[in-house]
Amino acid sequence: MSFALAWVIAFVSGFVALSCEILWYRAYSVGSGGAPPAFGMMLGFYLLGIAAGAAAARRVCRGAATSAGDARFLGPLGAFVLAANAVSFLVVPLLARIVTVAPWQASLPLVALAAGSLGAILPLASHFGVAPDDRAGWRVSWIFAGNIAGATIGTLLTGYVLMDLWPLPVLALLMVVFGCAAAAVVFARSSLPLPNRLASLAACAVCAIAAVAARGALFDGLWERLTFRREFAAGKRFVQVKENRNDVICVAADLRVYGGGLYDGALNTSLRDDVNNVWRAYGLAAYLKEPRDVLVIGMSGGAWSQVIAHLPGVERVTIVEINPGYLDVIAAHPQVSGLLRNPKVDIAIDDGRRWLRRHPDRKFDLIVQNTSQHWRAHSTHLLSREHLELAKSRLLPGGHFYFNTTESPDVLMTGLAVFPHAVLLWNFMLASEAPLIADEARFRPTLRSFEIEGRPVWDFARESEETAFEAAVGKCLHSAPRDSIRSALRGSTVITDDNMASEWATRVDGR
Amino acid sequence: MAEADATGGEGSAGAATRVTPWLYAVFFVSGFAALVYQIAWQRALFTVVGINVETVTIVVSAFMLGLGAGALAGGALSRDPRRPAIAFFAAAEIGIGLFGFASLPLIDAAGRACDSLPDAASAALVFALLLFPTVLMGATLPLLVAHAVRADRNVGRAVGALYGVNTLGSAIAAIAATLLLLGELGISGSVHLAAAANLAVGAAGLVLWRTGR
């Protein structure tokens, strides 16, 4: 094998390996429900596979000390390339089926198996393309650099460009066809006997055609299986799926929204059929008289922002959302789509914490942060003491910070460590440097006459509407004060950027 | 066994001999430390410059490009058989370890600088920050391959074994970081552990060089 061919093989294997890793991580991220260990565990098994593949390559090379440039060895190399691609293609569909009956970790050996075949390619290409002389290190460095160049381009092209263009099943298919073509090139250049070479080329073609033909069945219900896992049922189908390079957003028939495999609110602003406990947004009116300038970190399906934009006295709402895909979700649903046309609302696509750091001049009467579960990967980015201090520094005098603790004692402890005054509305902490007092006399008429886009929230002509109203008032006014919160937090930890406490102290399956 | 010559270089001629198992042991630890850094530094960088997909892409690409450039640099260093590849390897590990100890304050300072910089300048700063350690990391494989090939004259065996043990170390690190290190030691403790491992590997490399193994 020539050095140039060895370099090309190393480049292609790097490209495919990293592209597959990105696709697998997307699937694992959803299939694990955003569990923090998903990336590390998947990467660990991926690397275990690579190491095993390298060990296998070492055995193949045993006794073949002078075979640089020898085309005979392209046969086994082609077989490794083909096997790597076939197994790699099956990882996501098999994971999607495994998580419906077993924990996501049960599928990790598949990752090792697929990566193992990929891991053998670099040493084999080095062995058969580099002479064992004093310049071996120099030549191997070029092979290694070619592999890394392929991996880098895989990261950029697949992770940044292609994932914004096509859904995961299409990209998986693209990779397997590309890999089969690469294997075919290796077989074609080998010195296998002609019948064997033709049979090898036919195997590549069959592998690619089979993948194309089976794609519908293999990827059927992919996101439903990965999201619902053991609660998956055959008839369960999302009504909207938005995939982009940031994440996967799915909307169920009951208008619940799932971001990255985890419940992320619902497209509902109704207090009567309050499936998403949106009363916690309305409840702000009991404690805040007129929050004029409001920041919302994390928009999701927009229901909360829609309510907040209609709170009495609100003049300006700045929303920072990291995933632009939610704009498409909101635009498709009339319950919340008015948010996008509201002149009071500005939406920035950015990381919430980064946005705060980059806008030190902006101060707010109210900052609302409805983040996902406290144990989700990267959740402490927005729940750490450092972030809460940053948010506090962006509040106007007497301003309020209202955030979802998702019932984590560590998050509650952190909130109390940063703010001197706090109350708890179920799992949301309202915190401030000023005392917090609910004003029932003001709140009742406010909630009774609440309107969204000119439409009243309540229809008191309906039966039992009054009962629903009283229930909502009761929940909003029934807040737990600071002292009672603190008494339940013995043994909890203040979350910092360094300890990431709520992410790593929870169960490995993240549920 | 590769003999250290009178100038401290490595012999280039002679029959194939066995590579000391210690070489694999130190490269295993080196791979372990590298992956701990990758996970911990990525996390620390995301905290200070954001976890949007653009930042993630920049950080991952910076890692990759640094490793690639380092591979070429290590390869270039290994071309001359009179140069002691194992000593350069040891120096690279010590360099990574020293950077490791200083890395988190540097990342924090870079994050503060990024707050007032345009996106392109922020990306360049992250690239620059990661370039030094990742180039050193990338250089280690070709250096050790050169050292091993001079000993046993088989490229596939050398790359397979060294790449294999280094990757195995990284695999164990990825799992250990997930199940133990980040939860028990936090980011700073994990990074300090990796830095100490690098210094130990560097010291072991120097011993292997001085003893001609």
Image (cartoon, rainbow, N blue to C red):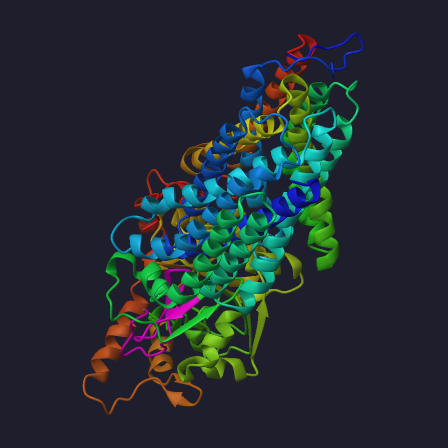
Establish if A70 lies above or below B87: below
Establish if A466 lies above or below A506: below
Image quarter hosting the N terminus of chain A: top right
In magenta segment, residue A294: no
Query: Hey, which quadrant is residue A458 in on the image?
Result: bottom left
- Magenta stretch? A249-276
**Camera-side residue of A32 and B144:** B144
Of all residues, the one furthest to the left in this rendering is A463
**Camera-side residue of A353 and A25:** A25
Residue placed at 38% from the left, 83% from the top? A450
Q: Position of residue A380 (x, y in %)?
A: 47, 49
Establish if A119 lies above or below A468: above
Position of A297 with respect to B69 (left or right) is left
Residue placed at 70% from the left, 53% from the top? B123
Query: Hey, which quadrant is residue A237 in on the image?
Result: bottom left
Of all residues, the one furthest to the front in this rendering is A194
Tell me if residue A124 can be seen. Answer: yes
Position of A423 with respect to A43 (left or right) is left
Q: Position of residue A391 (x, y in %)?
A: 55, 57
Tell me if residue A321 can be seen. Answer: no
**Camera-side residue of A480 and B51:** B51
Residue placed at 35% from the left, 62% from the top? A218
- Number of marks: 0
In magenta segment, residue A259: yes
Q: Position of residue B10 (x, y in %)?
A: 73, 15
